[in-house]
Image (tube, rainbow, N blue to C red):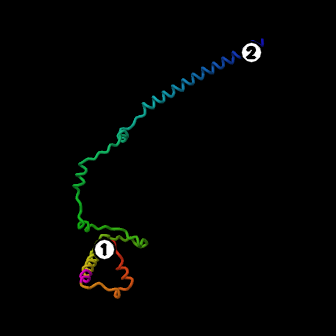
Amino acid sequence: MKKNSELEKQLNRLRHQKNLLWLGILLFVLVILWILLSIFTSSRTSTIAPELMELAKPFIPRLESSIFADIQGQRTYAQGEIGFFPIYVIDKDNLEADLKFVDITKELVESEQTVDAADAEVEQLSVDAESTSSATPSPTQEEVGPVEAIVSAAPTDAE
């Protein structure tokens, strides 16, 4: 009897394991079917908008010659014409007071005039220096002093 009860236990265990095996196979097939069904339905319902498809196209750079013609045909302003357009900036020196707008084109014209005047003055001085240097002889060592004589006697790169 002992043998029979032992055999029955093993037989019951094998039947139980067989049932678990069938249950595992059935679960595996169901999971595979579920995944395939999900992929199929999502591919059917998922559509990409035409605007996004247009944006997803690869960028191919092309230089159109008509653009260059348009750029060359645009009107340019001469320096004299630009001077008639006022350009205002906010005066940041005194922010506690009322906002003060300053026309910087007037300052530019004034600074250009002072630069032009300074250039003319430098040019005049150089002309005067050339005319006086050719008329006066070069100073001697006693007139210049020892330091200036050493500097003037030093060799230059031109030599």
Q: Secondary structure at mark 1?
A: helix
Rate crowding at label 2 as few (under 14), some (14 to 19) or many (20 or more) other CA atoms within 10 Å: few
Looking at the rendering, the stretch of residues picked out in magenta corresponds to 129-134
Residue nearest the viewer, comparing 153 with 56: 153
Which percent across, then down, holds residue 136? Answer: 26, 85
The quadrant in which residue 47 appears is top left
Residue at 75% x, 14% y is: 5
Q: Say which amino acid is labelled 2.
A: Glu
Q: For mark 2, what is the residue?
A: 6
The residue type indicated by label 1 comes to Ser
**Closer mark to the observer between disc 1 and disc 2:** 1
Question: Which is more N-terminal, label 2 or label 1?
Answer: 2
Disc 1 target residue: 111
The part of the image, by quadrant, that contains residue 149 is: bottom left
48 drawn magenta: no
Q: Residue 111: x percent and y percent?
A: 30, 73
Q: Is residue 158 above or below residue 26?
A: below
